[in-house]
Image (spheres, rainbow, N blue to C red):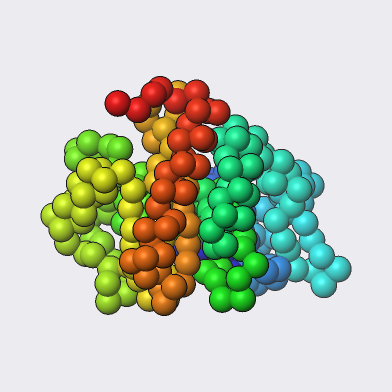
């Protein structure tokens, strides 16, 4: 299942109800589900009546935002994909992909590209490795920014006031190693800022580690993070020391292509 925030989880029942809100809720629910949904399932997930959902699905189907299968279940339609492609940070993805491919060939582990979306990191590109044991990710996955090396790297280019505004009031404990204290987390981000890259072990998933650095855009602000994800058992100090310079090299190359200002 895709890690997409669902409307019910985000308490959309407290929003003013409108046809637009209902349509967006339905699209988000189907996208988050990750597999075809029946009308009954959509109604249950949104907390709306079947009559209301029936009208909304009919409109969305006509506009190609959803597609009805032969078994009468629904999936996301081609129009949603089309708009998503326009909205996506296409240029940084296009420029980063060749460098990501070279990085995967050089280190043998998978590489992802992520951007900040609210208080989460959103995966926008992924180059898999051919390792038998690897960290599995999906494009479109969303993960709390404070649990990932890519998130800490991204935040490290922001000032502390911006960071605190992005972090949720309560930091959810996802594993035994998740940092849930704001002051401690801010200290970790300061360390990342000082050395120029982030390393996390088991903060989001107990079996996953990451090495990440952030690429700046033409305005000098963070544009996207490049992250090497590897199983924690393989993330030895020696392995991390081998990966870090190659990640930094790839990030600098992406920045040059993207027109970022020279580093101080």
For image coordinates 33% across by 48% down, the residue present is 197
Q: Is residue 119 above or below residue 148?
A: above
245 left or right, relative to 185: right
The image position of residue 24, as x and y in percent, is 57, 49
147 left or right, relative to 65: left
Assign the C terminus to one quadrant of the image: top left
The quadrant in which residue 49 appears is bottom right
Residue 246 vs residue 2, the one in the foreground: 246
Q: Is residue 98 above or below residue 31?
A: above
Residue 227 vs residue 40, the one in the foreground: 227
For image coordinates 54% across by 62% down, the residue present is 109
Asked whether residue 162 appears in the rendered view, the answer is yes
The image position of residue 118, as x and y in percent, is 39, 46
Most distant residue in the left direction: 183
145 left or right, relative to 94: left
Q: Is residue 26 above or below residue 38?
A: above
> Total of numbered circles in the picture?
0
The image position of residue 3, as x and y in percent, is 51, 63
Residue 18 vs residue 90, the one in the foreground: 90
Assign the N terminus to one quadrant of the image: bottom right
The quadrant in which residue 41 appears is bottom right
For image coordinates 44% across by 73% down, the residue present is 234
Most distant residue in the right direction: 70
The image position of residue 144, as x and y in percent, is 37, 58
The quadrant in which residue 127 appears is bottom right
For image coordinates 23% across by 65% down, the residue present is 179
Asked whether residue 12 appears in the rendered view, the answer is no
Residue 52 vs residue 24, the one in the foreground: 24
């Amino acid at each position: 299942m895709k890690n997409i925030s669902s409307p019910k989880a985000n308490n959309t029942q407290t929003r003013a109800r409108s046809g637009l809100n209902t349509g967006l809720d339905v699209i988000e629910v189907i996208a988050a589900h990750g597999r075809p949904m029946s009308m009954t399932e959509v109604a249950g997930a949104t907390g709306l009546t079947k009559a209301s959902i029936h009208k909304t699905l009919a409109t969305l189907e006509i506009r190609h935002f959803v597609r009805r299968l032969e078994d009468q279940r629904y999936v996301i339609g081609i129009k949603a994909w089309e708009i998503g492609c326009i909205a996506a940070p296409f240029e940084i993805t296009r420029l980063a992909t060749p460098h990501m491919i070279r990085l995967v060939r050089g280190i043998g582990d998978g590489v992802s590209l992520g951007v900040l979306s609210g208080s989460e990191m959103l995966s926008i590109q992924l180059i898999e490795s051919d390792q038998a044991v690897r960290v599995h990710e999906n494009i479109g996955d969303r993960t709390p920014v404070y649990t990932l090396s890519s998130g800490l790297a991204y935040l490290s280019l922001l000032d502390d006031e911006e960071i605190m505004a992005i972090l949720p009031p309560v930091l959810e404990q996802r594993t035994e190693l998740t940092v849930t204290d704001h002051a401690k987390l801010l200290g970790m981000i300061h360390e990342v800022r000082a050395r120029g890259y982030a390393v996390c072990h088991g903060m989001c998933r107990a079996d996953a580690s990451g090495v990440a650095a952030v690429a700046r855009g033409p305005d000098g602000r963070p544009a996207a993070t490049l992250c090497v994800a590897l199983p924690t058992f393989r993330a030895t100090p020696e392995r991390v020391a081998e990966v870090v310079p190659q990640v930094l090299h790839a990030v600098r190359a992406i920045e040059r292509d993207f027109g970022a200002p020279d580093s101080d």
